[in-house]
Image: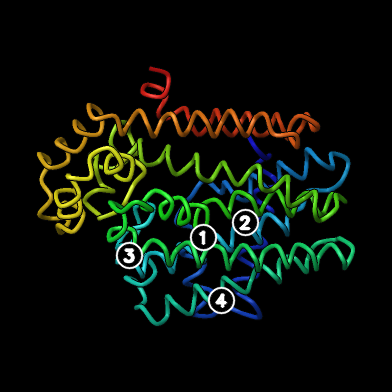
């Protein structure tokens, strides 16, 4: 467990309190629905756990954990609008329940609430300023990464397709693994430059997380009704870009599959992709990339010099790889 339940409960209370502001409102209702819809609270847990490793004798950084989790949920609200997703965590998305305009408003508000959460921290003003700067930079990185996603289908079979995929992931996914640790390091009294290096190590977890998620969609149990939901939703994965590096002649087939409406994508289409990725080498290339990320991350000087952070990284890596251990270890 990355963080005790009582700390997470404090994070939840703070997020809901900030969502309501000075009193119950439409925006507060939408944000509360979003927060209560579920989720693993991985970013909050990571912030709490990193701070505990770096400053074990100090009270939990609840405000920082809330800030990271609020930013993450803001991006989910906007992401659902852009992708047209009608369900999130098994519940109707904000734009489906309340309309696009109000969902945008709620997402915008959640982009601002993290700074109010930071204000609740008992920390020196200079530390609050530095983590506010880190948060603003991470938010920019996420938006830039999201912008790459819109072009991934067009570029996935081109020479720079893999680079574009990784740029997208390092933005919209990896930034939210770097941020909790970087901010925790600053709050623990580590210099800004060193905190950035420490956060950069954990940023690689975001890339690992996405590769694992891509593999899980086709070769594991993602908790959805059947394998291949990402394909049905037209999402470019590491498996797709790796396959097209080997077999560029398959670009027309794969792009056509991604552009096919979900309801018209057959199970036979998905099974064909599963077989091609496995037999053609894309699966093994994705897994090899994951193994390289793990090896390079665990050998980073920032982890070698801090046993607590190394322990945290080891726990996170094991947790991420467990759902695909049947293919990762083969």
Report how far apart the C-alphas of labels 4 and 3 lie in the structure.
20 Å
Q: Position of residue 40 (x, y in %)?
A: 52, 46
In the image, residue 32 sits, relative to residue 222, either above or below, namely below
In terms of sequence position, does the residue under pointer 3 or pointer 1 come before the other? Answer: 1
Q: Position of residue 164 (x, y in %)?
A: 41, 55
Q: Position of residue 247 (x, y in %)?
A: 23, 40
**Circle 3 is placed at which residue position?**
83
Report how far apart the C-alphas of labels 2 and 1 lie in the structure.
8 Å
Q: Nearer the viewer, mark 3 or mark 1?
A: 3
Mark 3, Cα crowd under 10 Å, few <14 / some 14-19 / many 20+, is: few
**Circle 1 is placed at which residue position?**
35
Frontmost residue, 93 versus 153: 153
Report how far apart the C-alphas of labels 1 and 4 lie in the structure.
13 Å
**Circle 2 is placed at which residue position?**
12
Q: Quadrant of residue 198?
A: top right
The N terminus lies in quadrant: top right
**Circle 4 is placed at which residue position?**
109
Q: Position of residue 327 (x, y in %)?
A: 36, 23
In terms of sequence position, does the residue under pointer 4 or pointer 3 come before the other? Answer: 3
Contact, mark 1 vs mark 4 (Cβ under 8 Å): no
């Amino acid at each position: 467990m990355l963080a005790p339940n009582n700390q997470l409960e404090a994070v939840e209370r703070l997020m809901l309190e900030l969502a309501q502001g000075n009193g119950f409102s439409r925006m507060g209702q939408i944000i509360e629905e979003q927060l209560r819809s579920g989720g693993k609270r991985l970013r909050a847990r990571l912030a709490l756990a990193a701070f505990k490793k770096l400053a074990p004798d100090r009270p939990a950084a609840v405000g920082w954990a809330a800030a990271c989790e609020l930013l993450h949920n803001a991006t989910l609200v906007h992401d659902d609008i852009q992708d047209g997703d009608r369900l999130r965590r098994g519940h109707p998305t904000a734009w489906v329940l309340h309309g696009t305009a109000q969902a945008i408003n709620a997402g915008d508000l959640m982009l601002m609430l993290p700074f109010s959460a930071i204000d609740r921290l008992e920390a020196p003003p200079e530390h609050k300023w530095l983590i506010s700067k880190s948060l603003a930079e991470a938010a920019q990185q996420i938006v830039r990464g999201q912008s790459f996603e819109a072009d991934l289908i067009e570029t996935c079979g081109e020479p720079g397709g893999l680079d574009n995929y990784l740029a997208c992931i390092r933005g919209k996914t990896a930034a939210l693994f770097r941020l909790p640790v970087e901010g925790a390091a600053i709050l623990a009294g580590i210099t800004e430059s060193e905190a950035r290096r420490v956060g950069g190590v954990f940023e690689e977890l975001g890339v690992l997380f996405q590769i694992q998620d891509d593999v899980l969609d086709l070769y594991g149990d993602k908790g959805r009704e059947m394998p291949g939901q990402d394909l049905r939703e037209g999402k470019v994965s590491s498996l797709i870009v790796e396959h097209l590096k080997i077999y560029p002649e398959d670009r027309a087939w794969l792009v056509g599959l991604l552009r096919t409406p979900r309801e018209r994508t057959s199970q036979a289409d998905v099974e064909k992709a599963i077989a091609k990725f496995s037999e053609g080498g894309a699966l093994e290339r994705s897994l090899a990339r994951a193994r390289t990320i793990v090896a390079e991350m665990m050998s980073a000087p920032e982890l070698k010099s801090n046993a607590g952070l190394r322990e945290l990284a080891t726990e996170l890596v094991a947790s991420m790889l467990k759902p695909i251990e049947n293919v990762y270890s083969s």
